Image (cartoon, coloured by chain):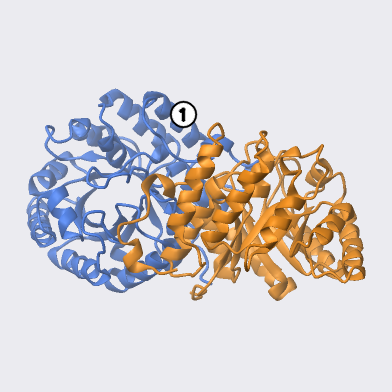
Chain colours: A blue, B orange
Amino acid sequence: MPPFPECAVIREVGLRDGLQSIQSVMPTERKCAWLRAAHAAGLREIEVGSFVPARLLPQLADTAELVDFARRLPGLFVSVLVPNLKGAERAIEAGADLMLVPLSASEAHSLANLRKTPDEVVAEVARMRAARDAAGAKTLIEGGIGTAFGCTLQGQVQAQDVLRYMQALLDAGADRVSLADTVGYANPAAVRELFGAAHAIAGERLWCAHFHDTRGLALANVLAALETGVTRFDASLAGIGGCPHAPGASGNAASEDLAFMLAGMGIRTGIDIEALLALRAQVAQWLAHETLHGTLWRAGLPKTFHAAYAN
Amino acid sequence: MPPFPECAVIREVGLRDGLQSIQSVMPTERKCAWLRAAHAAGLREIEVGSFVPARLLPQLADTAELVDFARRLPGLFVSVLVPNLKGAERAIEAGADLMLVPLSASEAHSLANLRKTPDEVVAEVARMRAARDAAGAKTLIEGGIGTAFGCTLQGQVQAQDVLRYMQALLDAGADRVSLADTVGYANPAAVRELFGAAHAIAGERLWCAHFHDTRGLALANVLAALETGVTRFDASLAGIGGCPHAPGASGNAASEDLAFMLAGMGIRTGIDIEALLALRAQVAQWLAHETLHGTLWRAGLPKTFHAAYAN
C-alpha cells in the first residue's frame, strides 16, 4: 500500500461553484467576510468567482472586486474560473494567480454548458496562453476537464477521450490540468484508473481533483485519488454547488468533512477545523433557505481530536 | 496498489442496529416484508434482531419470530446480536446461523452499554462456545469489537487493547471477529492500520467491518478496509442506526450507497440496487417521522449504470 502524503491542499470553491448554483446574490461584503474568515481558518487556495458575463451569472458579477480583496490576504493563492479569452483577459487584468478553464469531455455537456466543442475550448486555451504571455503576466492556466467520469446528457465518457483532451490542453499551453466528476458518476475504481493514467500524461502538472457528492462517494473518491498521488482537492463549504446542466448534481465534497478526514489521517492541510466549522455556521445562516450538505457539523469533532492531531 | 476484490458481501443490519435506535416499534409483519424484499433484492446476510430482554428493547422483542421467518428464505444467512449466554441460548434454539457478541474495547462504553468489562465479555464468549458445542449446534460466534477507533465516553482507545481483545475472543472460541467504529471516530488511515494489524491476528476469521457515517467518512473507511482485504461490510438501509451511549452517532453506512459504490467498482455483491432503492422507499414511508440518511436515493442511479455494470 502506498503511504499517504504528509500534506494536502483543499481549494475552497464554495464562492464560485457553490454560489453560482444558488439563485440569490450574496452581497460582496459577505463574500469578503467569507474570504477573510476562510483565510483566517488556514485556507490558502480559494476560487473566488468566475469571469463570465454578469447577465449569465449575476451571482458572480463582483469577481474582479473579490480578486482584488483576496489578493491582499497574505499568502492566499487566488483562482478564478474563465470560460473564454475575454474572461482570461479580465483574470489577467485583475491579477488572479490562476485561471481555471473548464473543458467538458462530454461533447453534449460541452455544447450545453459552454456552447463550444472540447476542441474549440482547447483552441481557446492556446489563445489565452498567448494573451497571458504577451501581457507578461504570471496567471497560471489550469485546464479543468469536467464530466471526466460520465455525463448526465451523453452518458458514458471514454477515458481515452479524457486523456486525449488532457494532452491537448497541455500542448495548447495549459500550465496545469485537473479532472472533475461534474455529475457524481465516479467511483473509487474509476478514480484510481483515470487519475493513474492522467499522472502518466501530466506528471506534476496534474493539479487537482474535483468531486461532487451527488451519490455519496465524494470522500471515498478523494481517498482513491489521494492514493494515486493527487494532493489537491476542490471542496465547498457546506457542500454547496452543482451544475445547471446536471439535474440533481448539487453537492461538492464538503470542505469541513474533507478537512476532518485529512487531519484525522495525519495529513496536514493547515486548516483550523473549528474555525472552518464556525464559518460554516455563519454561511449556513446567510443561506438559511438553501439546501446545505456535509456531515461533521452535526456531530462535531471527536473528543479525541485535539489530543490526537495537530494541523 | 492492491487490486480490488471480485466480490463483497453487504450484511444488512437495519433491522437490528437501525430499529433499535428508533423508539417506535415496527410491526413484525412489516419486518417480514422488509426481510422478504431484501432477500428478493439479493441480500444474503441479514442481522434480523437481537436476543435481549424485551423490556430493554421492545423494538426487537420479535427476534425469534424473525429468525424463524428468515431461515425459510432460500440461501439467507441469518445473524442476530446476543449480549450474553442467555441470548446465545435463544439464538441457538432459534437456529440462527451466526450470533454476534458485542465487546466494547472502551471499558467505559462497555460498562455503560453492556454492564460488563471487556474481559467479562470474553469469559461469556467462552461459555457461549461451550453451550453451542454442547448443543451440537452450528451457530457461528462472531466477536464484534466496538468503539475500536475511539469512544465518546472514554476518548482514545488504544489499538493494542483492541488487538488484545481480538486475540482473547479467538482464544475463547469465537469463530469470527470484526471491528466496529461505533461512534464515527475512524478515518481511512486508522482503518488501514488497525485492519492491517487485525488481519495478522485473525486471518480469514476477520469477518466484517462496521462503520458509522457520523462524520461522513463511512464509505471512505469502507474503501480503506477493502484495500486491506476485508470483503464483508455491515450497512443499514437508509443509514438508520446509532448507539444509545454515543450521542449524535446515528447513521450506519447506507446499504444502498455502499451497494452502488461496490457495483460501480465492478465488485459483485449480488444486489439489485433498483430493488434495494424501492425497498428503501417503502421503509422510508414506514419511518416517515424518523431522520433517514443516504445520498443515492435523491439523485438515482447514473444513466450509464446498467450499461456499465452487471451485478
Q: Position of residue B32 (x, y in %)?
A: 63, 50
Which quarter of the picture shows residue B214? Answer: top right
Residue visible at 28% across and 60% down? A150
Q: How many marks?
A: 1
Camera-nearest residue between B59 and A119: B59
Camera-nearest residue between B3 and A280: B3
Q: Position of residue B283 (x, y in %)?
A: 54, 43
Which quarter of the picture shows residue A156? Answer: bottom left
Q: Is residue B170 above or below residue B50?
A: below
Q: Secondary structure at mark 1?
A: helix
Estimate how packed mark 1 is, as few (under 14), some (14 to 19) or many (20 or more) residues with alpha carbons within 10 Å: some
Q: Position of residue A63 (x, y in %)?
A: 21, 35
Residue visible at 64% across and 45% down? B29
Q: Left or right: where does residue B4 sit relative to residue B302?
A: right
User: Mark 1: which amino acid?
Assistant: Ala
Tell me the residue that label 1 is attached to: A281
Residue visible at 25% across and 26% down? A25
Camera-nearest residue between B31 and A26: B31
Q: Position of residue B136 (x, y in %)?
A: 87, 71
